Image (cartoon, rainbow, N blue to C red):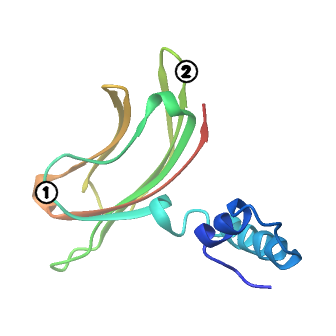
Amino acid sequence: MAIQDIDYIKTRFESGDRPSSQDYIDLIETLSAKSTDLGTGGNNESEVAGLENPTVIDEVNLADWRMVKYIVSITKNTGGANKYYATEFSILIDAENVNVAEYGSIDNDGDIGTIAVTAANGKLQLLVSPNPAVIPITARFARMGLKA
């Protein structure tokens, strides 16, 4: 049993040869491991450092998604500052509207910026706007969702 690179697994099943029992075991082990990694790698967890202006830190096509969830934090922990803010967004996308629910917001030391979800030009955007008094800040986010 071995966890394999997903591209390697894909080639084993697309080669035209009959996959071996080991190929199936590798597939199961790899998918099982990947399912527990959700939010800890790839584009599911990203960091954008040095933000000094309002910045779109993530965007996805509206037509591709029915529901998206973001977990987002912004921090300022340089120059003697220890400011943190975190929040979550659930976004429902239908043919005509983007419905956003923000919840679980928490901070430890005042306003370091704002986080918003917007829709523009067929894209869902995650926008971070730093407070000019505490720039630069760092934003981290995890995204998960359900396809349309």
Q: Which mark is residue 132?
A: none
How far separated are the C-alphas under marks 1 and 2? 33 Å
Of the two numbered discs 1 and 2 on the same chain, state the one appearing first in sequence. Answer: 1
* Residue 40 image point, x, y percent: 54, 69
Relative vertical location of residue 130 with respect to residue 17 in this rendering, above or below: above
Residue at the (73%, 63%) spot, across then down = 13
Crowding at dot 2, Cα within 10 Å, few <14 / some 14-19 / many 20+, comes out as some
Residue at the (22%, 74%) spot, across then down = 81
Q: Which quadrant of the figure has residue 16?
A: bottom right
* Residue 92 image point, x, y percent: 56, 30
* Residue 98 image point, x, y percent: 47, 24
- In what quadrant of the picture does the N terminus appear? bottom right
Which residue type does callout 1 highlight? Glu
Q: Secondary structure at mark 2?
A: loop
**In this figure, which residue is indicated by the disc labeled 2?**
94
Which residue type does callout 2 highlight? Asp
Residue at the (18%, 46%) spot, across then down = 54
**136, 134: nearer the viewer:** 136
* Residue 109 image point, x, y percent: 31, 63
Relative vertical location of residue 39 with respect to residue 98 in this rendering, above or below: below
Q: Residue furthest right?
A: 21
Residue 101 shown left or right of residue 55 in the figure: right
Crowding at dot 1, Cα within 10 Å, few <14 / some 14-19 / many 20+, comes out as some
Q: Residue furthest front?
A: 16
* Pair 1/2: label in front: 2
Q: Residue furthest bottom?
A: 1
Labelled pair 1, 2 in contact (Cβ < 8 Å):
no
Q: Secondary structure at mark 1?
A: loop
**In this figure, which residue is indicated by the disc labeled 1?**
52
